[in-house]
Image (cartoon, rainbow, N blue to C red):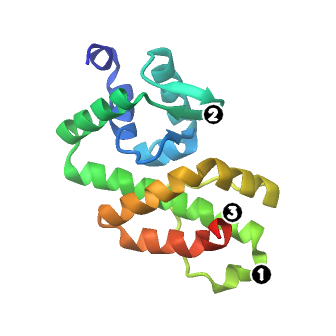
Amino acid sequence: SLSYQQLRPDKQRMFRLLGLHPGFDITAEAAAALADVPVDHAEAVLERLLDAHVLLQQVPGRYTMHDLLRTYARTVADADETPENRHGALRRLADHYLHKVAVASEIMHPDTAHRRRPIPEPAMPVTGFADAAAALAWLNAERGNLLAVGVSAADNGLPHHTIHLSELLWRYIS
């Protein structure tokens, strides 16, 4: 609580929103979608949170929280963010992952791209992949998060995100 109170408002907001992320870790790009800020801003805030010792970085570019801090961040988010803000953050996060999975799927399985349902563009553009190997590496790194986001989407009134993620991920997971 004392560490949180010492943070500037934009860092407090990011900390709160990170508590909503259903997965284990997060990239700057996903955090940017969650907070609806540019990626470079999100990365700078994540680095400040790392400096404040409220985030951990066990793998370069991937940020996580201790379980107790995650619980605290979620509690503060529930208290300080409106239900609409929390839902909007989860929607942006689900949109981000859905679009990123669609991009990875199109690169890995170009022969099936014409058969998938159209997916609306996310509010924040996502970066692409250099090739199928890069797409597969991203899917491998995000696997736990993708499954958690699918469950979270279903639990938070976004069932179409769960359905779309399932449709896009079945070839990867099977």
Label drawn at residue 104:
3
- Which dot marks residue 61? 2
Horizontal and vertical percent for residue 88?
A: 33, 55
The residue positioned 54% from the left and 51% from the top of the image is: 144
Q: Is residue 109 above or below residue 125?
A: below
Q: Disc 2 to disc 3, how far (Cα)?
A: 19 Å
The quadrant in which the N terminus is found is: top left
Of the two numbered discs 2 and 3 on the same chain, state the one appearing first in sequence: 2
- Calculate the distance from the C-alpha at mark 1 to the C-alpha at mark 2: 31 Å
Three-letter code, disc 2? Gly
Identified at 36% across, 40% down, the residue is 17
At label 1, which amino acid type do we have?
Asp
Nearest the viewer among 23 and 37 is: 23
The local secondary structure at tag 3 comes to helix
Within-10-Å neighbours for mark 2: few <14, some 14–19, many 20+: some
Q: Quadrant of the C terminus?
A: bottom right
Relative image position of residue 90 (x, y in whole percent): 37, 54
